Each structure stands twice: as C-alpha cells, then as structure tokens.
Amino acid sequence: MRDLTQGSITRTILTMAAPMAAGMLFQTLYLLVDLYFVAAIGEAAAAGVGSAGTLMFMVMAITQILGVSTVAMMSQAVGRKEQDQANRIFNQSMGLALLCAVLTLVGGLAGADAYMAQIAADTATREEGTLFLLWFIPGMSLQFPLMAMSSALRATGIVKPGMLVQMVTVLLNTLLAPLLIAGWGTGLAWGVMGAGLASTVSVTIGVLILVYYFIRQEKYVRFDLAQFLPDFGVYRRMFAIGLPAGGEMLLMFLYFAVIYLLIQDFGAEAQAGFSIGGRIMQSIFMPTMAIAFAVGPIVGQNVGANRWDRVREACKTGILLNAAVMLVVTVVMQISPQSLMRGFTDAPAVLEVGGHFLQIVSWNFVAQGVVFSCSGIFQGLGNTRPALLSSLLRLLIFVPVSFLVAARDDFALHEIWYVSVLAVVAQAGFSYLLVQRELRSKAHGEGSRPKGSVQPVGSA
C-alpha cells in the first residue's frame, strides 16, 4: 500500500501515471499492430472489426461499475486506515466480477450476429464483425476480473504490477497477431477470427498472472472466497457509485453506434476510415487517461483522510497536466493526420475519411483531456453522477443535431465530426463546473469533520 496523502501532488500524479502510461503505450502498440493486420485483409474486415469493437464500450460500461466503485470505496477506506473494510470491498468486487463474466460470455455469444446486423454497412462487413466477436467475446468477459484486481491495486496506490501485466499481455498479443491473423510462419491465416483469438488468449494469460500476484505477493488485500458471497449492503454502495460511471460509458457506446449508423450510407470505405481513425484516436488518448486514472485514487485517499487542501490541488494539477498533453497532440494532428493513416491502408477513400476525421476532431482534444480529468476526480470523490450528467449532455447535443444535419440532401460526412467537436467542448465546460460545485459541496459538508468521521462513500 502507498500513502497518497503525503508528498508533492504533481510528483505523485506523474510517478503513478508514468508506469500506467507505459503500459498504455504497449496497449497502443497492440491496437496499432492488430489494426495493421486487420486492415490488410480488406475494407470489409476493417469496417467489421471496427464496428464490432463498439460493443466493447458496452462491456466497459459494466466493468466501470466494478472499477470505479472499487477505486472509490477502497481508496477512501485506505485513507481512513480501515484495512479490513478495504479487503472486504475487494473480495465483493471479485465475486461480482465473476458473475458478470459468465453473463457477458453467454449473452455475447448468443447476440453477436443480431448486433452486427443493426450497424454493418453490408453483408460482408456483418459477417466479418460477427466472426470477430465470437472469438473476442471470451476475452471481453475476462475484462471483469482483470478490472477488479487492477482497480484494487490502484486504490492502494500500487500501479506497477498492473502495468507489467498489461505489457506482457500486449506483447503476447503483438506476437500472436501476425501468426493468427496473417498466418506468418504457419500458413494458416485466420483473418478476423485470429484477431479475436489473439486478444482472448492474451487477456486470459493476463488474468492468470494477476491472480498469481495476489496469491504470492500482495499483502494489503487478499483473496477470501467466503467474502465472494454477495453482501447486498456493499453491492448497493458499489452500484450507487458505479452505475453512473457505467452509464457514462454506455452513453459512449451509444455515441459511437450512432456514428456508425449515420455513416452507413457512405459505404464500407467510410466505416473503415472512421474505424482506423477511431483506433488511432484511442491510442492518442491513453497518456491522458493514465493521468486521470492516477488522479482518482489520490483524490479518494485524501477525501478519506479529510485533506481537502490536497484534494483541490490534485484536481487542479490533473486538469492542467491533461490539457497540456492534449494541446501538444492537437498541434501534431493539425500538421499531418493522414500520415498516421498511411501506416494501415493505402485506399484513397479510406485515407481521406480517416485523415479528415482526425484533423477535425483534434480540435476537441484539450476539451477531452478536461473531461477525462473530471471523470477521475468524480471517482475519487465517490460521486460519479455528475460525470454521467456531462456525458448525457454530450449525447443530447450530438444525437439530435447530427440527425438534423444528416437529413439534409447535401449532407457531407465531415459535418458529423464538427458536431462531435461542439458536443465534447460543451461537455468539458459542464464537467468543470460540476467539479467545482462538487468540491464546494463536499468540502462544506465534510471539511470541518474530524479525521475518521468522514461521511460514508456514495452517501452524498
């Protein structure tokens, strides 16, 4: 366990974010290598895998319930020096993770084709996306125990084991991708099926490594199978904190699903261009997400310790760091966005869509950095409802305006990207205002309380 209630806030954020960012850079490598080999198969494969990948947002919405609530509740318990309570929360999270994994596996395999039928641009895209999902869904289901264990470590200020596991899984996936997708060395090119299988095998090994770590190395919290059994009091607190965060990610799923629906008539080339551009954008966001992930437990432990001066400093520092990182990225995207696309495709139509997408949406990258930071702050404060409200505002702006724009006879694809910029900028401003309101409310209600008498997590 690492005490996050002492020392320099900036240094603490950077030292926590650095290994997470390193792990995410390896994750970026995985995304780009996977994308490279899938895009080489053809436009239908790239479009199918990209559109099928939107289902990951739905799974992430549910994993957010686990991850956010585990970080918020455990970090505040750690700040109050309540180790037994932290251990109980961890084991309850693991029990819920296993249940969610089973439900995701069964439901996902049963509904994969029906899902692709709704968003695919054509039959070939539908078939490729469905095949990918059938082999990718087992790996998605294992994201639940992986999230529970990683979040527990992060709540206690420990990030290196999670980073190392992520590096191992990404390196393994990077090795498997050319073997299973393109058939290097084997002659058995399994295409999109190989992409799904490579991911599933890699995540499985990552889960096993983290289980081994908890059994042999972790001292602050331990597996206790008896505490896996549902405690509905703990569940209620977890859902009170986690459901808004899960709803936030679910809105992101709807956001991307709407985009695929709106660009359907532009064909597989447009969906492929957006898929590749979207993967590149996800990779760009990873360092910013690392900073946001570091801010959450820092805020949480200091809330538990009743250190509101440090809570406010962590919020300010996290927002400024993320805004600075994304400003640099924005400049790069304005100079040569298509150069990134050319590493994955040489199809002119795909290049044009993806490059134009990256260049336009980069205008909201600074705003997106603010959104990520605010989301991490809300998690640490133990109240994720404001993050859900800001995501809802984004969707309420984007969906109706996009459909109005798309209804015009002279509708052009790039107009959707401008609407997206507008929605994200509005979300960032709203998120910042909600953070300020939440800090005033929490500090007024709890700042004068003696240490150890902090209001229970999720009750605000």
Image: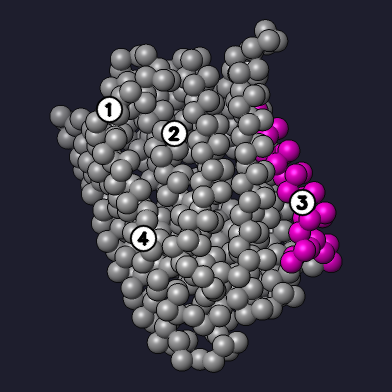
Question: Which is nearer the N-term, disc 1 or disc 3?
Answer: 3
Which of 262/182 is in front?
Answer: 182
The image position of residue 183, as x and y in percent, is 64, 12
23 versus 97 height, above or below: above
The local secondary structure at tag 3 comes to helix
The percent position of residue 159, horizontal first and vertical second, equals 61, 54
334 vs 49, nearest the viewer? 334
Q: Residue at x 61, y 18 (%)?
A: 178
Magenta span includes 392: no
Spatial distance from mark 4 to mark 3, Cα to Cα?
33 Å
* Disc number lying in front (2 or 3): 3
Whichever of callouts 2 and 3 sits on the residue coming sooner in the sequence is 3
Q: Which mark is residue 213?
A: 3
Judging from the image, what secondary structure is the residue with disc 4 in? helix
Applied colour scheme: one colour
Range shown magenta: 198-226
Q: Is residue 264 visible?
A: no
Per the image, the residue denoted by label 2 is: 279
Query: Callout 1: 10 Å neighbours few (<14), some, many (20+)?
Result: few
Q: Please identify, in this view, whether the residue under mark 4 or under mark 2 is nearer the observer.
A: 4
* Residue topped by disc 4: 319
Q: Secondary structure at mark 1?
A: loop
Which of the marked residues, 1 or 4, is nearer the chain's N terminus? 4
How far separated are the C-alphas under marks 1 and 4? 27 Å
The circle on residue 133 is none
- Given residues 108 and 193, the one toward you in this image is 193
The amino acid marked with disc number 4 is Ile
